[in-house]
Image (cartoon, helix red, strand yellow):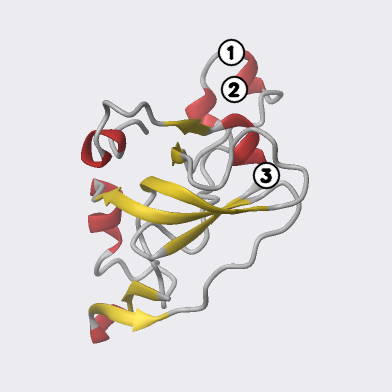
Amino acid sequence: MKAAVYRGAAGLGAEDWPKPAIGRGEVLLRLKGCGLCGSDIAKLGDPATKIPAVFGHEVVGEVAALGAGVSSCAVGDRVVAAHHVPCGACHYCRRGSESMCAAFKASNLDPGGFAEYVRVPEVNVRHAMFRVPPHVGDVAASFVE
């Protein structure tokens, strides 16, 4: 598949990238769109950014494949998938401050939204993936995050 791959000083460009494999409870999305977030821009030129990298996490796509046990959606459904999922049990989650949760801070999409396909992990499928109504366009849906 093709992806926009960031290689530090070597720049950013379209390259071949391995199509992610999915496991039990996971979903493979064929991307229809992805928002460009300030956090993506901030990673450009940041020496702490691991390279190579595929950025993007504000995704909308069509379900291309289902892992075993997935029943919340079907192949062909148009969905959004949030990349952050809080644990629900830590001190911060219990106080309603989920954005401070260590689990929430990790981006779970593989490889990232600036690719043809993205793997949505089981926890995201269960708690942070939603069908997009027909009257909502792909651009608008990418802002759901």
Callout 3–callout 1 Cβ contact below 8 Å? no
Local crowd size for mark 2, using a 10 Å CA cut-off: few (<14), some (14–19), many (≥20): some
Residue 95: which disc?
1
Residue 92: which disc?
2
Please report the residue visible at 41 percent of the width from the left and 77 percent of the height from the top. 52
Q: Looking at the rendering, in which quadrant would you find the N terminus?
A: bottom left
Mark nearer the viewer, 3 or 1: 3
Q: What residue type is labelled 3?
A: Glu
Please report the residue visible at 36 percent of the width from the left and 72 percent of the height from the top. 3
Q: Position of residue 67 (x, y in %)?
A: 70, 52
Q: Where is residue 8 in the image (x, y as percent from the top left)?
A: 30, 78
Callout 2–callout 1 Cβ contact below 8 Å? yes
Q: Distance between the residues labelled 2 and 3?
A: 22 Å
Residue 34: which disc?
none
Q: Where is residue 43 in the image (x, y as percent from the top left)?
A: 30, 61
Please say if 31 is above or below 127.
below
Q: How far apart are marks 2 and 1 (CA)?
A: 5 Å
Local crowd size for mark 3, using a 10 Å CA cut-off: few (<14), some (14–19), many (≥20): many
Q: Looking at the rendering, in which quadrant would you find the C terminus?
A: top left
Q: What element carries label 3?
A: helix
Using the image as rendered, state which of residue 22 and residue 102 is in the foreground. Answer: 22
Please report the residue visible at 39 percent of the width from the left and 67 percent of the height from the top. 54
Query: Which is nearer the N-term, disc 3 or disc 1?
Result: 1
Please say if 6 is above or below 94.
below
Mark nearer the viewer, 2 or 3: 3
Q: Is residue 65 left or right of residue 107?
A: right
Please report the residue visible at 51 percent of the width from the left and 30 percent of the height from the top. 100
Q: Where is residue 59 in the image (x, y as percent from the top left)?
A: 37, 46
Using the image as rendered, state which of residue 133 and residue 144 is in the foreground. Answer: 133
Residue 122: which disc?
3
Q: What element carries label 1?
A: loop
Q: Is residue 14 left or right of residue 128?
A: left
